[in-house]
Amino acid sequence: MSILIPSIDELPQNSVVLVYDIEAIGDVNRPDTCFIWNLSAMVLGDKNKVFDQFIVPPVTKIPDPPNPKLFRVTHDFLKNANARSTHDTLTFFFKWIANLYDPESGGILLLVSHGNFRFDQPLLQSEIIRNSVAIPKNIYFMDTLHWFRNIKKKQRSYSLSNLYKDQFNRPIKNAHLSLFDVHALHDLIQSQDSKLFGIIYNIFHTSLLRIPQVGLFTERLLFDHDMHSIEHLVYKFRNDCCCNPLHLRDFLLKGCS
């Protein structure tokens, strides 16, 4: 499901907002080939509360990055960085979160990243399932890519690196190591006149923005018509068509016209 927040200041009391980032190998659209090797997070507004851990992906050979300009991770690098298993890291990550967030307090845990809906969220969900890691309730996700598109019109690029360089007139130090990207995104968010706002999605629910040709305007229309995620949209369609054959007939007629 999803929630519309007009401003991050209007989140339920006792909510916690984490800026986070994931680095991985493989194709996120093929979860069986995609694995995290670096996970970092920071409490929005408190740069002293930081999580950073390297992870040993369960592969014999780590493939080269798709772009030679990207950081090339190796097993030797991870060994020297005291990398841990995915299961241990995610367990440790949610124990760290437990010191910040009480799921019984009435608040929510909001995980914010750039490109969240297409990369970080689906990969984190896959790893949680694959490693059978217990998680707290009321976890939601926000993607700052769409927020920046809303507050900064006609940018030449909405990549994190370009937004950061345009804002601070310098590149991100050690970009594509997750901790540095977390610092960069945190500082970008804090430097804007506007507070975070938009539709946030519950864990294991897919953003409506993942539907081809659906932008922020259409997402809001669907939300206002009680469509709160792709899973919800599919469920309502299947349920309506199964319960009322006329709905299916009308849908098919429109598709053929």
Image (spheres, rainbow, N blue to C red):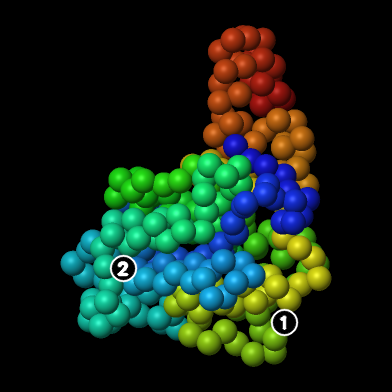
Left or right: 24 with respect to 20?
A: left
Pinpoint residue 61: horizontal percent, then vertical percent.
Answer: 21, 70
Q: Which of marks 2 and 1 is in front?
A: 2
Residue located 56% across and 66% down the image: 43
Q: Can residue 10 be seen in this view?
A: yes
Residue located 55% across and 57% down the image: 111
Left or right: 192 with respect to 54?
A: right
Residue position for label 1: 167
Label 2 element class = loop
Mark 2 and mark 1: span between their CA atoms?
Answer: 31 Å
Q: Nearer the viewer, residue 79 or 8?
A: 8
Pinpoint residue 19: horizontal percent, then vertical percent.
Answer: 56, 65
Instruction: Report the quarter where the N terminus lies.
Output: top right
Query: Tag on residue 55?
Result: 2
* Quarter of the rendering containing residue 85: bottom left
Mark 2 neighbour density, 10 Å: few (under 14) some (14–19) many (20 or more): many
Say what amino acid the circle numbered 1 marks. Answer: Gln
Q: Give the mark, 2 or 1, whose residue is nearer the N terminus.
A: 2
